Image: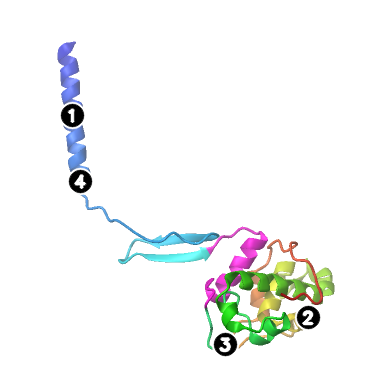
Amino acid sequence: MKKKIILLTLGVIILSAFTRVQFNSTPIKKVQYNLPEANTIVTVCKDIEPFELIYTPTIDNTFIGFREAVAFKESQGKYNKVNSLGYLGKYQFGKTTLNRIKIYDTNKFLNTPELQEEAFIVLCSVNKWILIRDIKRSVGKRINGIEITESGILAAAHLAGAGNVKKYLRSNGSEIFIDAYGTNVQHYMKKFAGYDTSFIKPIKNHTI
């Protein structure tokens, strides 16, 4: 019995030593990177060095999901982004739109994330008020094969303005606004469909 125990113990020791040698013979790649912001998914590509990180918004259908998805499409979520046409911030506001909601200091706007988040909600609120009848009439219908949802309408209004969304809906999809970069209302209507935007209340003259 003692011989069996000794042999078993020796076997375990030898096996452990062999395993350590095999494990240590394989080089280990160490990756260091900053943790992402909230409401994002990180994809790490390990096939290339330096390792590439790809950030995308979470895919939940809450208002936060909607907000972050729109922001990612507009600016990849960058608060200080200014595009070639002068649109500003995380949600790419035009100066005229900012003035409409009583924001006049664009430098302050770019450097104040809280103000940008509030501005997005305010604009959604105004657009929902302008489009409330169209939302009631159109949600649940299909236009050009796309199911119309409230979140799709609000996202399209952010891109093109509420007036152009009205034209699209009331023409049954025959009048399609296209922006300077070639993105159209219909694309936003489809891409941002199905989010819960009931959080947004329609307010006619909502301002900051």
Q: Quadrant of the C terminus?
A: bottom right
Instruction: Give the distance between the C-alpha atoms of the residues marked 2 and 1, in whole angstroms.
Output: 77 Å
Q: Are marks 3 and 1 in contact (CB under 8 Å)?
A: no
Question: What's the amino acid at mark 4?
Answer: Asn
Structural crowding at the residue carrying mark 3, measured as other residues with C-alpha within 10 Å and reported as few (<14), some (14–19) or many (≥20): few
Q: Quadrant of the N terminus?
A: top left
**Residue at 71% across, 77% down:** 157
The residue tagged 1 is 13
**Vertical arrangement, residue 177 with respect to residue 191, above or below:** below
Q: Which residues are magenta?
A: 57-80
Q: From this viewpoint, is residue 186 visible?
A: yes
Instruction: Give the distance between the C-alpha atoms of the residues marked 2 and 3, in whole angstroms.
Output: 25 Å
Camera-near label (2 vs 3) is: 3
**Vertical arrangement, residue 68 with respect to residue 96, above or below:** above
Earlier residue among tags 3 and 1: 1
Question: What's the amino acid at mark 1?
Answer: Ile
**Residue at the top extreme?**
1
In the image, is 56 to the left or to the right of 122? left
- Dot 3: what SS? loop
**Residue at 16% across, 25% down:** 10
Camera-near label (3 vs 1) is: 3
Q: Between residue 24 and residue 37, name the one nearer to us.
A: 37
Instruction: Give the distance between the C-alpha atoms of the residues marked 4 and 3, in whole angstroms.
Output: 55 Å
Question: What's the amino acid at mark 3?
Answer: Gly
- Magenta span includes 64: yes
Earlier residue among tags 2 and 1: 1
The residue tagged 2 is 166
